[in-house]
Image (tube, helix red, strand yellow):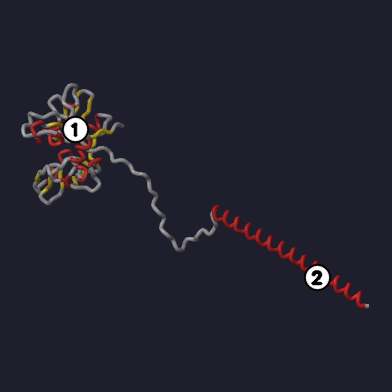
């Protein structure tokens, strides 16, 4: 099943570059001067970095009165909401969102007849289901109705899931890292494997062979020396006998 993520819209009145990228038209000084992510992608229109997923991940959010990072006033409930576009610590990728039943959502306005928990540690931005702006069969993931243009129809997160084969999320799925096996803790009761490895057995075999060879060489040397000594003794005896025979 296709997984898509949110792309930003464009608000020219805010200036140039990423500063002019927005998620909802309510962020524009004049809501009538707003280009949705769909409109930015139309042929002949200005291409913008607002379509880069990096913009969504790094976009700054606001805060509830208690300092909790929040995407909107509805999530803060009665605490009060303060929107600061320069709060680096409240970027979307560093914020946890609300949980509705077993689904992570952008706003409690999308949560019907289920318990809303905000914030939830399990709701990182790549887990947050969002709605979409739809035109004919084209789906453009969006955080709210305020992200759609006049030619599109808003679908809630539930409607996206139930009426299309697409799933819309706030952020791209996080890349999966390499698997690192968890080391087995040391168990002093567990029998230790004392069988030598193949490398150890080879080393032991070579060492044993060298030792046996050395012993054999020493034995041969001693044997030769013994024979030489015996031969010398025999020669000496022959000399003595000869001398004795001459004396008689």
The residue indicated by pointer 1 is: 49
Residue located farthest toward the bottom when viewing the structure as drawn: 248
Residue appearing at x 22%, y 28% in the figure: 139
Q: Nearer the viewer, residue 205 or 181?
A: 205
* Secondary element at image label 2: helix
Residue appearing at x 85%, y 74% in the figure: 240
Residue located farthest toward the right when viewing the structure as drawn: 248
Q: x, y (%) of residue 64?
A: 12, 48
- The reply to whether callout 2 and callout 1 are in contact (CB within 8 Å) is no
- Quadrant where the image shows the N terminus: top left
Please indicate whether residue 25 sits to the left or right of residue 207 in the image. left
Which is closer to the viewer, label 2 or label 1?
Answer: 2
- Quadrant where the image shows the C terminus: bottom right
Residue 12 image label: none
Specify the quadrant of the image occupied by residue 152.
top left
Q: x, y (%) of residue 159?
A: 21, 32
First in sequence, mark 2 or 1: give its number. 1
Residue appearing at x 41%, y 55% in the figure: 184
* Secondary element at image label 1: helix
Q: Nearer the viewer, residue 226 or 134?
A: 226
Please indicate whether residue 239 sits to the left or right of residue 27 in the image. right
Residue 233 image label: 2
Residue located farthest toward the top when viewing the structure as drawn: 44
Relative to 45, residue 181 above or below: below
Specify the quadrant of the image occupied by residue 116.
top left
Q: Nearer the viewer, residue 128 or 8?
A: 8
Q: x, y (%) of residue 9?
A: 15, 32
Disc 2 to disc 1, C-alpha distance: 106 Å
Q: x, y (%) of residue 177?
A: 34, 44
Say if residue 179 shows up in the picture: yes
């Amino acid at each position: 099943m296709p997984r898509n993520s949110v792309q930003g819209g464009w608000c020219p009145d805010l200036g140039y570059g990423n500063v002019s990228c927005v998620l909802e038209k309510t962020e524009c000084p004049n809501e009538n001067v707003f280009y949705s992510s769909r409109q930015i992608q139309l042929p002949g229109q200005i291409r913008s970095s607002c379509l880069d997923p990096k913009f969504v991940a790094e976009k700054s959010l606001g805060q509830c009165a208690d300092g909790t990072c929040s995407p909107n006033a509805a999530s803060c409930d009665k605490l009060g909401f303060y929107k600061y576009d320069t709060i680096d610590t409240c970027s979307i990728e560093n914020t946890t969102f609300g949980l509705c039943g077993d689904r992570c959502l952008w706003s409690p306005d999308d949560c019907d007849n289920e318990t809303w928990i905000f914030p939830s540690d399990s709701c990182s931005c790549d887990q947050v289901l969002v709605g979409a702006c739809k035109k004919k069969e084209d789906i453009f993931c969006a955080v709210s109705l305020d992200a759609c243009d006049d030619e599109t129809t808003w679908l809630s997160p539930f409607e996206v899931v139930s009426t299309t084969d697409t799933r819309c999320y706030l952020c791209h799925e996080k890349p999966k890292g390499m698997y690192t096996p968890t080391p087995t803790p040391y168990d002093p009761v567990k029998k230790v494997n004392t069988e030598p490895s193949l490398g150890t057995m080879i080393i032991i075999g070579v060492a044993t062979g060298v030792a046996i060879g050395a012993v054999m060489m020493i034995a041969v040397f001693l044997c030769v020396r013994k024979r030489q000594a015996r031969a010398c003794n025999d020669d000496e005896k022959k000399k003595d006998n000869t001398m004795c025979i001459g004396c008689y």
